[in-house]
Image (cartoon, rainbow, N blue to C red):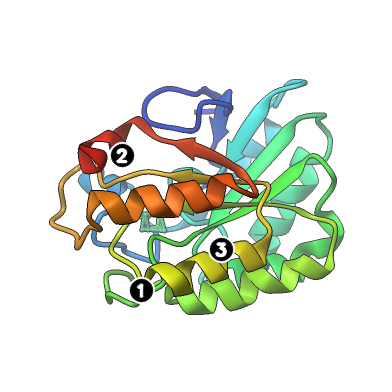
Amino acid sequence: MGLNKQSGNMYPFVTHTWNPIRGRCPHQCCYCYMKRFKVGNLRLEEKELQTNLGNSNFVFVGSSTDMWAADVPSEWIQKVLEHISKYNNTYLFQTKNPIRFLKFLSYFKENYILGTTLETNRDYNITKAPEPIERWMAFMQLNKYSIRRMISIEPIMDFNLRDFLCMLRDIRPEFVSVGADSKRNNLIEPPPEKIKQLIEHLKSYTNVIIKDNLKRLLD
Ligand code: SF4
């Protein structure tokens, strides 16, 4: 597969995706778009470690499975981080198990952005990943380091406005991306006014990316 040019409902700034670790994601989120595909067991594709990642790209590493899940061997992650360090790109990592980032702090450079997904502040039991409050607590530990951070609120689910706003502000993210469930998985979604209040507040202190798929919930 190698380096893939970005297409589809991704972040607008991402130029490429690269998936050296593939297979069935242990988190098994009920809304996962990868559920449609036969992806096999979790594995490191060693041949991907020969991929030329180019220069000045914005690469989302691990867009098809959560390469930071607890079941992923540290050795695989280490090999991926060693490979990307040879190329001068901006890299985005996103996980629902951000505590794993803390074990690899020495690898992260100023052109790396670490992200976590917080669909809501509530636990709806829709994934085997750590619940949102655990992700938040782990991600908060990155505040001690000068590491770039982002939050993905996608697919957005109903939340407690005040609590969620406090959680998000405490993280001090460089940007927040807000999107909705594209595949209509019958998630519990917030009303338009609540989403608008959330976005308005976020805009007062950070950059907000509003994904096209959110329009369905704002009308
Ligand atoms: S963490 Fe991401 S890749 Fe893994 S099951 Fe959930 S949505 Fe899919």
Q: Mark on residue 159?
A: none
Q: Is mark 2 within 8 Å of ligand 1?
A: no
Which residue matches tag 3? 168
Which residue matches tag 2? 214
| Nearer to us in this view, 118 or 109 | 118
User: Residue drawn 49% across and 44% down?
Assistant: 177
Q: Horizontally, is 139 left or right of 81 in the view?
A: left
Q: Horizontally, is 31 left or right of 21 in the view?
A: left
Residue 47: tell me if it is visible.
no
User: Residue drawn 84% across and 44% down?
Assistant: 110
User: Residue drawn 69% across and 32% down?
Assistant: 50
Estimate the x, y position of residue 58 in percent, counting from the top left: 66, 29
Which label's residue is closer to the chain start, 1 or 3?
Answer: 1
Which residue matches tag 1? 128
Ligand 1 found in image quarter: bottom left
Three-letter code, disc 1? Lys
Residue 10: tell me if it is visible.
yes
Q: Secondary structure at mark 1?
A: loop
Q: Secondary structure at mark 3?
A: helix
